[in-house]
Image (cartoon, grey):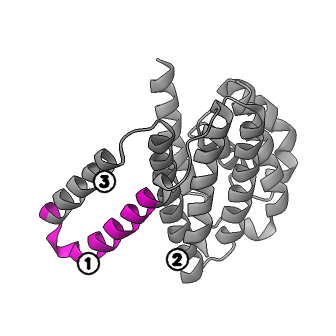
Amino acid sequence: MKRLMVLGLLCLSSIAYAGLEYKSFENINCEKIGVIAEDIMMNWQHGASFKEMMENSTKYEKDFSPLVDAGSYMYALNTEAMMKPVRTFPHSQAYEAEIFGIDSSTTCELKKFNSYSGNYLLKKRKECRESAEYASTIMSSRQENLPLKEILTLNQEEYEQRIFNERYRKSEIEETYIETTSLIVDAYSMPVGGTEIEKEQAIIDYGADSYLKCMN
């Protein structure tokens, strides 16, 4: 039931964001939005319910007020935070909050560019986030000691299936295959953490490193 509720909130969040792409962002303090987003993520990491998160966000109403639809943006930030994993250890929770704050501030700045450049950067950011999530999944497999051969085989099978289904995108798919293979090999060249904290940190760090390389 809780999973269905979260999925429903996420769908509504995407609708809310669709109407917020470029409404009055020129008047909003994006640095402050980053601080607010960090606080929102910490609430999520500490087990707050959606209702509690929204109630806590009301103290930031004046910071959202320059937006035409401030309530929807506040709602969207909270539901986006709920898409992120809840970390086990305090230092990892703080890291997730910091990254979410930076990410939200960057998105806010990009929304001020009501132009082709802004659209391009938002698209690139989305692609880099997906790449980072994939990198984290690969490192998770490494930290669980899953066989390298098994992961490479799965990657090969996915590549062959995509080539079969989308032959018109062959060059793009081949490029992606080379990138994912490189991510796998690099991840498996790194040690397995000796403790659960070290393993979780390795997963987080590998995803963050992938994101930064993609954006640069």
Labels in figure, total: 3
Q: Can residue 65 be seen here?
A: no
Q: CA distance from mark 1 to mark 2?
A: 21 Å
Task: Identify residue type, mark 2.
Answer: Tyr
What secondary structure is found at the residue carrying circle 1?
helix
Q: CA distance from mark 1 to mark 3?
A: 20 Å
Residue 149, position as x, y percentages in the image: 30, 49
What secondary structure is found at the residue carrying circle 2?
helix
Q: Earlier in the sequence, mark 3 or mark 2?
A: 2
**Residue 152 tag number:** 3
Residue 32, position as x, y percentages in the image: 85, 56
Q: What's the residue at 68%, 58% (across, down)? A: 103
Task: Identify residue type, mark 1.
Answer: Ser
In this picture, is 216 found above or below 69?
Answer: below
Question: Viewer-nearest of labels 3 and 2?
Answer: 3
Q: What's the residue at 62%, 57% (across, down)? A: 208
Q: Earlier in the sequence, mark 1 or mark 2?
A: 2
**Residue 120 tag number:** 2
Q: What's the residue at 28%, 69% (across, down)? A: 173
Quick check: 212 left or right of 141? right
| Residue 207 covered by magenta stretch | no
**Residue 88 tag number:** none
What type of secondary structure mainly makes up the magenta span?
A: helix
